[in-house]
Amino acid sequence: MCRAELRTLNPIIAEYAGQVDFYLVAFNESAATLEEYIAENGYANMTAAQPVGSMLRDLKIVSQSSVMAMDSTGVITFRKGYGGRGADFSAEFANLVQ
């Protein structure tokens, strides 16, 4: 996920804290590095995670920055790749908590 998206998502994530879990995963950085980035930038309610096994391939993450949402049953309800425009993250989070 690109840094601009994290800045955009941070206030939305705060609004849905306790209702939506937000995980930050990178294929080229460790979870510890992501935790440092989260802390240094004052982000809250984000959990850094290390990809396990074929997770990225299974989720069809092929671009440097991808955002996806899954409902409580694991069904992907939203997907946005790097450079996509017009994503309404606020609306997607609202859909997830219904």
Image (cartoon, grey):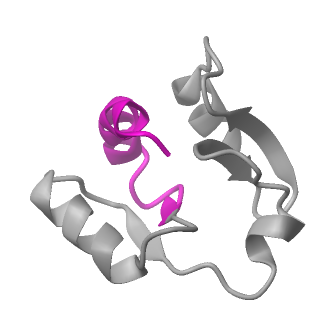
In the displayed image of the protein, which residue is found farthest to the top?
86
Q: Which of the 4 image quarters holds residue 30?
A: bottom left
Residue 90 located left or right of residue 75: left
Q: Which of the 4 image quarters holds residue 79?
A: top right
Q: Is residue 98 visible?
A: no
Q: Name the residue rendered at 43%, 46% in the picture.
A: 16
In the displayed image of the protein, which residue is found farthest to the bottom?
53
Q: Name the residue rendered at 32%, 45% in the picture.
A: 14
Q: Does the magenta portion include 15?
A: yes
Whether 66 is drawn above or below 46: the answer is above
State which quarter of the image contains the C terminus: top right
Q: Which of the 4 image quarters holds residue 80?
A: top right
* x and y, in percent, of residue 31 in the image: 41, 79
In the displayed image of the protein, which residue is found farthest to the front?
28
* x and y, in percent, of residue 73 in the image: 84, 66
Q: Is residue 21 visible?
A: yes
Residue 94 located left or right of residue 17: right
Q: Name the residue rendered at 30%, 74% in the picture.
A: 33
* x and y, in percent, of residue 94 in the image: 60, 34
Q: Name the one closer to the observer, 21 or 36.
A: 36
- How many numbered marks are there? 0
Q: Name the one closer to the observer, 93 or 65.
A: 65
Residue 24 located left or right of residue 65: left
Q: Does the magenta portion include 23?
A: yes
| Magenta-highlighted residues | 1-24
* x and y, in percent, of residue 12 in the image: 39, 35
Whether 75 is drawn above or below 83: the answer is below
